[in-house]
Structures are given as C-alpha cells and as structure tokens.
Image (tube, rainbow, N blue to C red):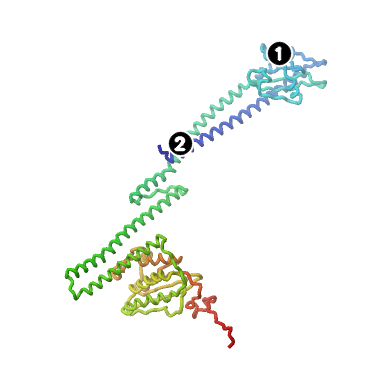
Amino acid sequence: MQKSIFSKYFRVCAISVLSAIIVLGTFFMIFAGQYFSKEKISLLTNCATVARAYVLERVDSRLLLDRDALAPTLTALSESTDTVIFLTDTDGKTLLCTEGSSCVVHSTYRVSSKILRAADSGLYTEMGRLERLYKNPEYTVCQPVRTTEGTVGYLFVSATNEELRAFLTEMIKIFLICALMVLLIAFVVTYFVTLKMVRPLREMSAAAKKFGQGDFSTRIRIDSDDEIGQLAMSFNNMAHSLSELESMRRSFIANVSHELKTPMTSIAGFIDGILDGTIGKDQERHYLRIVSDEVKRLSRLVRSMLNLSRIEAGELKVQTTPFNILEIICETVFSFEQSIEQKNLDIRGLDTDKVMVDADPDLIHQVVYNLVDNAVKFVNNGGYLEFSFNVDGNRTFVGIRNSGEGLSKEEIPRVFDRFYKTDRSRGIDKNGVGLGLYLVRSIINLHGGDIIVKSVKGEYTEFVFSVPTAKAKNPALVKGREKEYPNQQPKEEHSDRPS
C-alpha cells in the first residue's frame, strides 16, 4: 500500500516526540537517582558524625568502649534515622550493632582491612553489599573513631535503598502521566499541522490531474509565505502560463486554419472557374494574377511559421558578419517604390554613409522588410518615413518611423503577439497574418538585442531595434557629430612616402 506524505510526516514527528520524551525521561531518572544518592550519603555522613562524637565521649583512659552504655543511644539514633549502626574494633571485628536479634550477622562478620585502610584516609562511602554482608545493595558510610592516642575503632552507618526505589517508582509514574499528556497534545498538534501542510500538496495533485485533462482553471489557495506557500504561488503562476499557452495554441490553430483556408478556397475557386470555363479567356490572366498573389501569401505564411518554429526550437543559428545595414534598408525601401510614389511619401534619414553592424544579414533583412512593410501600409497619404541611427557602446539602434494614425495604449503591449492584428489593420492589411512583428522580435532577441514601439495617437508610430555594433567605425554616426562621439572620429591617413 502506498504511503502518503501525511502518514510519513506524522509518523516521523510522532517517533521524534516519543524518542525525545524517552531520552528526557532517562536522563531525568539518572540525575534524580544521583541527586537522591548524594542526599542519602549526606544524611548518613551526618548521622555517623553524631554517633562518632557520642562514642568518643564514652572512651575511657584505657581506650576501652562501654558497649552497654553506648547501645541505647546508638539504637535510638538508628531508629530515628532509619539506619543500621555498628561499631568495630581496629581489626574489623564487630563490637556493637543496632540490629537487635540480627546483630549476630555482624558479630561473625569481620570488615576487611582494605575497607578499614580506606576509612583511615577520612570518609569511606559505598553503595553495595559491603563485601556480602547485606543481601541487597545498601548505602554505607564509615568513619574512624580516633582519639589523641590513636584509633580505637570504626563506626559504620548503613541504610537500604528502598526509599530510592520508591522515589524512582513515584517519579516514573508522574513522568509517564505527564509524558502521555504531552504525547497526546503533540500528536493532536502534529496531526492538524501536518494536515494543513499537505493540503496544498493534495490540491496541487488534484489540479495537476485536471491540467492533464486540459482544464487550467484551478488555482491553489495560498495561506502562508513559507516554502509551501511559495510553491503554491509558483504552481498558480505555472497554471496561468499554461492557460495562456493553451489559449495561444488554440488561437494559433484557429488562425492558421483560417489563414490557410481562405487563400486555398480562393485558389481552388478561381482554378475551377478557369477549368470549367466559368471565367472567360479574357479574364484568365487577371484571376491567375490573384491566384499567384494568394500562393505567395501562403508561401510567406509557411516560411514565417517555419522560421518561428526553428527559432523556438533553437535550430536557427545566427551567422553574424559585419555589414552595412544602411544598404539593406535602402534596397528594401526601393522595393516599395511603387507604394511610396502612390502615397507621395517623404523619405528621411537615409542621407548617411555607412552604418556597420555585426549581425546575420539575411535575418536582419527580414526584420527590416517587415518593419518597412508595416510602415508603408499604415502611413498616411502625403506622410513620411523616417529612419534614425544611433550607437551606445556596443549596441547600434535603428529606428523606423511613419506618420499616421498611430497606435492606442491598449494596442501597444500586444503588437508583438503572434497573429495579433488591430481592428484598424484588418481593414488595411488584408494580406497580413499577424506573424511579422512576432518574427521580428524573435530575430532581434536571437542577436541579443531588443525592440520597442513608440507611438503617439494621430501623429506617428516608431519601431526601434538594437543589434551589435561592428568593430569597424560607423562614419554615419560621427560625421557632423564629432563632439558627441570623440572616440569614433575617423583618423587621417598619413603617407610614409616623401612628397
């Protein structure tokens, strides 16, 4: 069975919390046990100190102990502190103990010299059976009973560790109750936090399935600005882009179908009319001319689409070489000579020498042709076409302006979209397909440049594109403008031959 992210994350969090509680409880018990042991040893030490002081008061001049006098007091002290007190001589043999009838165990027990030597150094403490004296481990403290004449014996004080076990048992009970409450709270919080965290992921999964079915309308609700929120935002942006791409794809198919269907229908109709005699012999040439124009229109459409396809696929390679872009512009303008004369246009800005750029001549020719074609189509009668050239560092800017109605603010952001044609252009440009400016921008971007459009409604429209400047000088940019371009002034040629 496939495990969800929710179950995985919840299980990891639960295990982490449980492990943390176990580690915390273990260290707590260890430290609590150590603290209790220290307190117990301290209590036994104080008891041993009091008992030793009392014993020293009962030592006679012969360094002998009155056991009958010591027994009641030490027994009372032992009962009040819940301890066992026994006194040995210097050889480790028991002289007195407070266990009552069980004292026979101590009477037959002799403390090893190893323990006695350790006690001679000060204070001896132990948590154990005192060399098998006790059945279970006990706390034991030993202090030497020493007078000015020497050591007269050793005082032992012992206590069971039942209190420690009882203490730890109670602490474990309390800790388990608290741990269960903490675990319950942690599991509830983790459950809802995990559920909230994976909700956008589940929504994304459901939305992705809809995307696969062609529905790009779903959007993910964004409740945070963390990584999940940023992912949801990126997912929504992707959905928006896919929606626009799908809309463009459908529009592309519809436009291409329309652009192919219209000329093909015209071509088929005129050819059939010529073949079946509907069109007379005297009109055949006229309609064949129309058919030729439609074929050329189809050819331009297919060529533009192929170029765009190659550009978008990265298959179109730019073959750059230095050349004079002014020559391409002049040749293009001459090819529109008939239309220019019909509209009585004034051509400006071509009275320069050379404008050298480093680009692909064929691709730049397409750019110039499309821009000049648009300018001639939409220029007003008696208007002008103006060309401008400027250089800024490594970039050369070429502007093509035409007078006329211009573009509205709503039209300017869309003029470079594929198959976009303004309502005004649909009546003027009946042969265009709306790919020219998109192709222009794609070619310019291939050269690392950019293209912008500037327009004033009722006055002019201008397209300005940039391409790399050739390493050679641009005399056209320098002539008459030496102050603006001091570093590009042409050098005078000097002859080494004698005059």
Q: Amino acid at mark 2?
A: Val
Horizontally, is 13 left or right of 248 in the view? right
What's the distance in space between the residues labelled 1 and 2, CA to CA? 63 Å
Number of numbered discs: 2
Instruction: Tell which of 13 and 103 is nearer to you.
Output: 13
Horizontally, is 324 left or right of 122 in the view? left
Q: Is residue 456 visible?
A: no
Q: Is residue 348 visible?
A: yes
Q: Position of residue 40 (x, y in %)?
A: 65, 25
Structural crowding at the residue carrying mark 2, measured as other residues with C-alpha within 10 Å and reported as few (<14), some (14–19) or many (≥20):
few
User: In front of the other: label 1 or label 2?
Assistant: 1
Q: Quadrant of the C terminus?
A: bottom right
Q: Quadrant of the N terminus?
A: top left
Closer to the N terminus: mark 1 or mark 2?
1
Structural crowding at the residue carrying mark 1, measured as other residues with C-alpha within 10 Å and reported as few (<14), some (14–19) or many (≥20):
few
Check the image and report above or below for 164 versus 191: above
For numbered disc 2, what is the local secondary structure? helix
Question: Which residue is label 1 attached to?
Answer: 108
Check the image and report above or below for 233 versus 52: below
Circle on res. 24: none
Q: Residue at (66%, 22%) from the top-left corner? A: 128
Q: Amino acid at mark 1?
A: Thr
Q: Position of residue 131 (x, y in %)?
A: 68, 20
Question: Which residue is label 2 attached to?
Answer: 188
